Amino acid sequence: MEDSYYSIDAILAENQKLQCTFKHSVPGLGYLEGGDAKDIKESDRVQLAYWLALRPLLQTGSADFTIPASFSQRVQNALNAEPRSVRLSSLVGGGGHWYALGRMIAQLLDHKEATQLAGLLNKTFQQRLIDLMDQAQHFGGSSTTSGQGGEDFREGFDATERELFALAQDSTRATKIWHESSDKNH
Amino acid sequence: MSSSTELSVQLITECKRSSNSGTLYKYNDNLVRQLSREIRVLDRDLTALLSSVSHLPANEIPHPELCALTMIQTTIERDKRCLLAYHQFRMSMLKDMYWAVGGALPHVLNDPDVRGKLSPHEVDFMREYARITMEYRSDLSDVVDITMGIITPPKDIHALVIVVRDCGVVTTELGAIDFQKGQRYLVRRADIEHLILQGYLEEV
């Protein structure tokens, strides 16, 4: 997934929510809490989209955020045990941009935690990629993961993985057509 | 005002659906207008808040106000980004449609189904885009025709084609040919390449 200004996927990914705790009041923005209150008060907890939380969090230090459940210790343990058995799509809502959310959170953490999270994302992606490509090329074939023909694994794809899967399928199809055509000898 | 973020998400979700299904959706004039209005409302809030602290030097603005200012400003920029991304997305889709038929603009614009989905500005854009493309094409006309399909290089000067839809009399190097549905012709490929792209002829 590209991060460009116009990228539809990047815009959607940045729309994921973070739980933020305000360190002081903010006048006139009470509507963000969904209630009738006019202002945000000190230590109020509000679900803010990442794009909105970024500047108040990082630049003015007006709020803290909680690491979302999709990256909790429990999820990390499960991923360390067997990356392919975790359904990434059900960890995050909407389009299932799990890796994108992880990358955004890593940018908000201090160096040590960020490196650890980045390592987890990297390792998860690499270990899942082999099965992903295998299944894209032999769709419906057997799989090294448990579940009916890898169906569980496929349903748990994150948005980036779904995109890769579709690309790999297209390329397999194109290769097959080329292979069966007579043009290749010319 | 609280719905402003929701509106921009609606617009972007529409792009996502459109790209997933590969179909062009009708230009969402209503949503674009609503979002523009939201930006104006936010700008009014921003100006009001700014004037309430304008007597202070920039580094003495209290944290709460500073935070509110940043958040409103961020929301405006986000709305703007979503609006631009929406239009950019549609433009690239329209350009793809234009190139898919070998640069035959009337073929795109005269399709009532497509035409009904475009905004007046998009029609203007398409005309202007076609104009500059044609201008560029004529600069290179002695070397290469940039509107030709290049996915498979031609192996033969001639092509055997069958007429799928009537397309009237076309002047070729062999003289004028009246292409009528169901007939077959052996013609010079360069003369009729664009008719294949537009779906009038099919190669046999």
Image (tube, coloured by chain):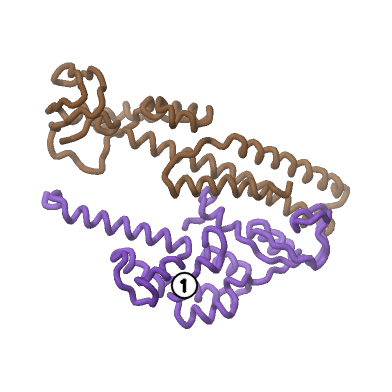
Residue B31: x and y in percent read: 62, 39
Q: Residue at x 56, y 65 (%)?
A: A92
Q: Looking at this rendering, what residue extends furthest in the right direction?
A: B55
Query: Is B51 drawn above or below residue B201 in the view shown?
Result: below
Query: Is A50 drawn above or below residue B107 in the view shown?
Result: below
Residue placed most toward the observer, A125 or A79: A79
Q: Residue at x 69, y 66 (%)?
A: A19
The quadrant where residue B22 appears: top left
Q: Is residue A111 visible?
A: yes
Q: Residue at x 68, y 50 (%)?
A: B75
Q: Is residue B131 visible?
A: no
| Amino acid type, label 1 | Asn
Specify the subunit that label 1 lies on: A
Q: Residue at x 37, y 68 (%)?
A: A132
Q: Residues within 10 Å of mark 1 (few under 14, many from 20)?
A: few
A35 to the left or right of B156: right
- Chain coloured purple in this rendering: A
Q: Colour of chain B?
A: brown
Which residue has dot 1 on it?
A122
Residue B88: x and y in percent read: 51, 41
